Image (cartoon, helix red, strand yellow):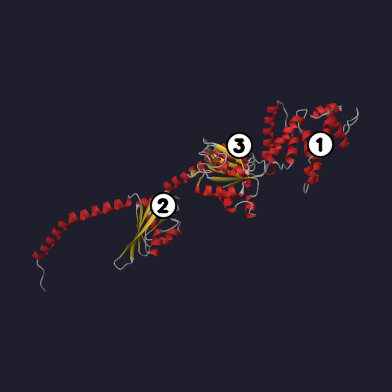
Amino acid sequence: MTRPSRTSDRGVAAESASAEASSAPELAACRDEVRRLRAAFDFASDGIWITAGDGTVLDVNKTSLALNRIRAEEVLGLDVRAIVELGIVDRSASIEVLQHRRQVGFVQQAGRTGRHLFVTGIPVFDEAGEISLVVVHERDVTDLRNMRDTMEETRRAFRKAEEELTELKLLELADRDIVAESKEMRQVLSICLKLARLDAPEVLILGESGTGKGLLAKFLHRHGPRAEGPFIQVNCAALPPALFEAELFGYERGAFSGAQEARAGLLELARGGTFFLDEVGDMPQEVQAKLLKCLDEREYYPLGGREPRSVDCTIVTATNRDLEREAAGRRFRQDLYYRLSTYVVRIPPLRERPEDMLALAQRELDRLNGEFRTSKRLTPVSMSLLQAHPFPGNVRELSNLLKKAVVIAEGDQLDAVLAETLGARPSFAGAAGGAVGLEEELAAVERELLLKAAARCRTTRQMAEYLGVSQPTVVRKMARHGVRLPERGKERPGVRVGRK
């Protein structure tokens, strides 16, 4: 056997040493590059996970370890499904990428820190089209979510403050213009404020006679963008049919016999403001057709005119009729009804809002006291009497009733006058259901007042002064209710004296 020469071994060693010496700088450069890449990987602002195509966790950077409060040895080599089962995250982007074979993104919550992370999973495909790796980026969006929640809370607080300000404004407006103690009336004012701000072209106000439709029309005008413009009102029921068209649209000189000069119509006078047609249900049919055309085209022709005039005002209409029924019965044009009823405001009758009734009564009494220089007051009995009455005439009836009571009552109380006036109403006897009960209740109140006065007073004159009525009235009512003044030293009517 031939032994290798020493010269040959030395040559190989020399070559190896030479190769190692020449590759050392390259290895060092590679190590430096790896360190740089590792540093970039570990300290990236986003958390990064790298998962194999079978779902095994291959690597996790330090940012993600901190975001999820985990150690590398806890998760490296685990299947991502186990990561979810352990509660480290509530949802895995890697799993969804492997399932759908496409990029995914969503907000995930870290189980240990509770922080919200926006994760993006990106598939890496090999030459065969299979997923070899999944790279997942995590970005902490907790602060953004907190900011969003704070902004939402701020928006809610702003909306609440706006509602409270609107409520305060409604209270202020109600105190100055319209009584709105009831929830129903506050809702009416709230709707009207919205319509006023909207500058709605037409508004229809429905309500029984005496509910304050005219006041509400002025309310709409005052709180809309046309508040500085004129407020023109016409009562359709009071205007003669022959003059209706001329009053509404105006006329040119010579348009008809007696038209010596041109005259502006109510629509022209309302330019830049509000035109209020009260009792629109009484408008003549022939004028209804022309009003509809005017509203549809937003222009009209004066009588005898050849040039159209534009409609530049808010049209507010009101009626105490059931316009829908009137239109169905062809007593009112259906097409005009549909046009007018785009925005409808319904004022509830006074009997459906007792809170408003008492506030209205007090306000009206204050006004009457100032007008007549009196100092009348509403007692609990007066309030009970008013609340028991249905007020078919609504606010107008209440006002007239109080005016009569203020004028007639001799003292500072209205109890006896209200009891007599309301109890004597013939409409009670003919009312359906419960009318007799109401009369009996009023009679009981009246008798209670007499008993109370008799218990306090010694003569019918004193009773009359106490009740604020005349002495003959007291004597007559005492006889009607069987009430007598007590004899001295004896028990007084309505007062029981017992012994312990």
3D distance between C-alphas at marks 3 and 2: 52 Å
Name the secondary structure under disc 1: helix
Q: Is residue 260 left or right of residue 444?
A: left
Report crowding for label 3: few under 14, some 14 to 19, many 20 or more residues within 10 A (C-alpha). some
User: Which residue corresponds to mark 3?
Assistant: 174
Q: Residues within 10 Å of mark 1 (few under 14, many from 20)?
A: many
Please say if 482 is above or below 299. Answer: above
Q: Please identify, in this view, whether the residue under mark 2 or under mark 1 is nearer the observer.
A: 1
SS for tag 2?
strand
Name the residue tied to disc 2. Answer: 117
Earlier in the chain: of badge 3 and badge 2, it is 2
Instruction: Say which amino acid is labelled 1.
Output: Glu
Location of residue 289 with respect to 251 vertically, above or below: below
The N terminus: image quadrant: bottom left
Q: Alpha-carbon distance for marks 2 and 1?
A: 77 Å
Q: CA distance from mark 1 to mark 3?
A: 34 Å
Disc assigned to residue 327: none
Q: Is residue 346 visible?
A: no
Location of residue 274 by image quarter:
top right
Q: Which residue is painted at 80% across and 42% down in the image?
A: 439
In this view, the residue in front, 78 or 389, is 389
The amino acid type, in three-letter code, at marker 3 is: Ala
Q: Secondary structure at mark 3?
A: helix
**First of labels 1, 3 by sequence position:** 3
Residue under label 1, please give it. Answer: 446
The amino acid on which the numbered mark 2 sits, given as a three-letter code, is Leu
Residue at x 59%, y 39% (from the top left corner): 233
